[in-house]
Every structure is written in C-alpha cells, then in structure tokens.
Amino acid sequence: MFKKIFNAALLNFWLFIAFACGIIFAFYFASLPIFIFTFITSVILVLFFYKQQQFLLSDIFIILLFFSLGALSYLPYSYNDADDFLGGENTYVLKVSSLPQKYLSKNAFLAEINEINGIPVMLRARVIDYDKKMDYLDKYKVTGKLSERQFNNFKFYTLWVKTNAYQEKLAMNMWDKATKQLSYRLLDIFKKNLNHESYRFLGSVFLGRRELLDKEEKGIFTDAGIAHLLAISGSNIGLTAVVLFFMLKLFNVKFKICLLISMFFLFLYTFMTGANPPVLRATIMYAVLSFSFFVKKKLNPFNSLGLAGIICLLVNPSWLLDVGFQLSFLSIFALILGFKILPVRPSKIEIVNQIKYLFFSSFYVTILITPLVAYYFGRIYVLSIFNNIILIPFFSFILTINFLLLVFSPFKLIAQAVGSMLCALIPLFYNLSKFLGSINFSFIYCKFSVKAIFIYYFSLAAILIFLVNRKSKADNKVESEVPRAILKDEPS
C-alpha cells in the first residue's frame, strides 16, 4: 500500500504537499527548536536508511525533511503580526505591485510590504498615497499609518501615506526595471490600437492588471462564475504558448526549435508579469513537460505539478496562503486527477471531443474548488460548468487575436485592423457574460466553514478511492479473462 502511495513517480508531488504542510504548521504553531530538531533527525535517518538500501523508509523521511524545510522557510515571518503595528505611525519598506489609480487628491494601489520598522513581514495591503509620487513596481521606504478592516472573517489592510510624509525611493534591481519597461510597452501597444474598454480588458487578462477594470465590469464576470479569467493565469499563458508553437509549425520550423522558442517566450512573459504564482506555475510545468520531449521520457504530471509548487514556495512561502495560488494549483490537480480516474472516451467527431473535454474539464475543476470558493467568497456557482463551455472558447479566441496584435504591432495598418477586430469581440464577450450571469440560480449564496471543507474533501476522497479500486478490479478481471478466451479458442 505504502509503496503505491510513496513511489518515485509521485515523490515530487508528496514533497510539495509536505513542504506546504510545514508552512501551514508554522503559521499556526511557531516553534524553532522543534523544526530544527525535526530537520536534523530527518537528515540523519534519510542517510541511514538510504545506506541500508531501505528506500521506502528513506523516501518517507525525505518527505518529513521537506515538512521541516517548509516550516523553517516560513518561520521568520510567523512571529510578526501586522496587528501589532496598527494605529500608530511606522516606517514601511514596500513595493508597488499594481498600477496606481489616480483620483483628485490621492492615488490608490496595491503593495507588498516587506518590512515594518526594520522587522521582516509578508503583507499585502492597499495603499492610499496622498503624496501621489509612488509608481508601479518601484520600491520605497515611507512613513504611514496601517489600518485593518474585516469582511467575511478575513482581514484586509490599508496603509495611509499623508502629504509630505517621509518617502525615500529605493534602488530597483535589473529584474524590476526590465519588467516595468516591458509592461508599459505592452500597455502602450494596447492604448494605440484599442478603444478604452478593450484596453482595460486586455491589460487585465494579459498583464494581470485587474485594477484597470471598474467595479461593474468585475461584477459581470463574478456573477457568471468566470472571475478567474480576469486575472492572468496558467490557462491564459498556456494557451498563448500553444498558439505560438503552432504558428511556428506553419512555417515548417522543427519541433524542438518550436519548443525552445515557445519556452523562451514563456520565461519572457513570466519576467514581464513579475513572476506571479499562476504564471510561474504554468511556466515551470510547460518547461518540465517540454524537457521530457528532449530527453524522450514521459514524466508524471503530478510530479510536474509538485515540482512547480516547490519552486513557487521556495521563491515565496507566503504564496501558499494566497487564494489565487490555492485555486490555481487545485484546478490543475483536478484536471490531472479527473482525467486519470475518469478518462473521456474519444469520439470520431472532433467537435464532439472538444465539447466533451471542455465539459469534463469544467466539471472536474468545479467539483474540487467549490468548497474553497464558498469559503472565501460565500458563493456556489451552479451554472459555472455550462458557462465555461461557452465562454472559455470565446475567451481563448480573443487571446489568440491579441497575440496576433502583439506580433504585428510594428506594422501600423495591420495592428489597427487586428485591434478593430478585438474592439468588436470584447464587447460581445462582456454582453454574453452579463447575460449568463443574470440567469436565475446562476449562483447561490453559501458560506463554507473550515469544518465543512474538511467533511467535503474527506467524502470526495472516499468516493475517489472507491472508484479507483473499482476500476482496478475491472482491469484485473479483463486481464485474467483474456488468457481464458485465448485458451478457449485454441484448437485441441
């Protein structure tokens, strides 16, 4: 039993789970001596059992080792509670992570706060800047007051920076400088070739700048259950890579060269968007799978997902606590698990295959993420499975046309023609989404508790284990009946 669970083909996946569990444990229970003891003990036992060629036990203690590593990576931040700095004026080191929205007397934007009074923290906050000097992706040392509000039992922080407050712009690294220049370059292409509505839409879905959309536009997609499309995601970037790959194939470019060019584009795209978790995860998975073609070895998709998860959490352990990260990884896990346990039978008609794939993809993802969506947002989307079948192909087509706009942007007439097509398609997408979201019972208000989430996933796991065992028994029965059939037909 343990050999099936902790086999080498799934080791990366279990290492990711262990690392994530360590972070969660450190979040609730910060104890440096215990985690250091666990780390040292795990290293000793891994080496001992490996030397004794007890590889199963060695793998189990490797998993325990990664649990302690996850805890130790998050531990420096677990001692610091942002609530300790509420009310009074403090000194903050922050990085602007969204485009500042300009109002009459202030600017508003999201920022990652890295230090408070010299103490390291991991905090995402909305900044109200009355000095109106801070800019996108720049890093600053400022004085201000931190406030906190609660909504649906979740805390949200706002940093208030008054006019003429102490403000020092810190040196930018080469990464952030290049990211800023590329982002503004792409936004400039959208501005020159699109109307304002289409500019805001593509700025959101392609560059992850959700702040460009107004409240009504966000509400349309939230009601339709497709708000995940408005933030840059693995599906967006994966689709763009596939489009690039097949466009190169049309020019008879060799297979491996196509892979290399598409991988280079993905790394560039990850670089442009600041390496946020969904993009980084998609890029790593695409790179791992592409590498398998070069070495001519089929890799386990769970292992690819696990490797992507470990790298993301090594970059920033606090990403695990971000709802976008959780939903992104859980969605990919749902697709891999769903099609592995309940594969779709192919049809002779290609369009039927595509509809089947879209339906079951939407079904598997919805089944697995519903508890988290209900926990964080207080909604269960009843019709999201069917909405996705209609809207995702439409959305994918828009992204493909957008890719053509970027490719032909140096050619003014072609770029404007492609831009006009996008300006016609995007309002249609808005209207269709608005219609689907307005249907009665498109969603229901329902708030899940942590206990309800645990019961849901425990029940789902029990059902999946039953289906796997049933499938395994059916396969074994077929295998045992084949030799009998051969013997029966054999002439005496």
Image: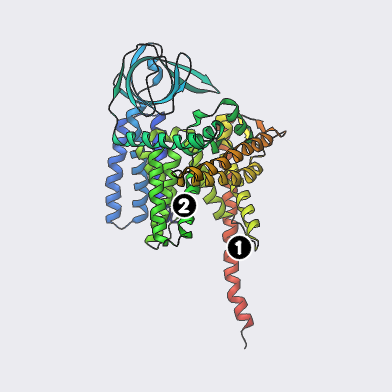
Q: Amino acid at mark 2?
A: Leu
Q: Quadrant of the C terminus?
A: bottom right
Name the residue type under label 1. Answer: Ala
**194 or 475, which is in the foreground?**
194
Q: Identify the residue at image location x=56%, y=53%.
A: 339
Q: Position of residue 130 (x, y in %)?
A: 41, 14
Colour scheme in the image?
Answer: rainbow
Q: In the rendered view, does 77 fall on the left or right side of 298?
A: left
Q: Which residue is mark 1?
A: 474
Foreground pick, 317 / 203: 203
SS for callout 1: helix
In percent of width and height, residue 349 lies at: 65, 61
Earlier in the chain: of badge 1 and badge 2, it is 2
Q: Quadrant of residue 472?
A: bottom right
- Measured from the top left, where is residue 272 in percent x and y? 39, 39
Q: Residue furthest right?
A: 440
Rendering coords of residue 396 (x, y %): 56, 46
Residue 11 seen in render = no
Residue tagged 2: 244
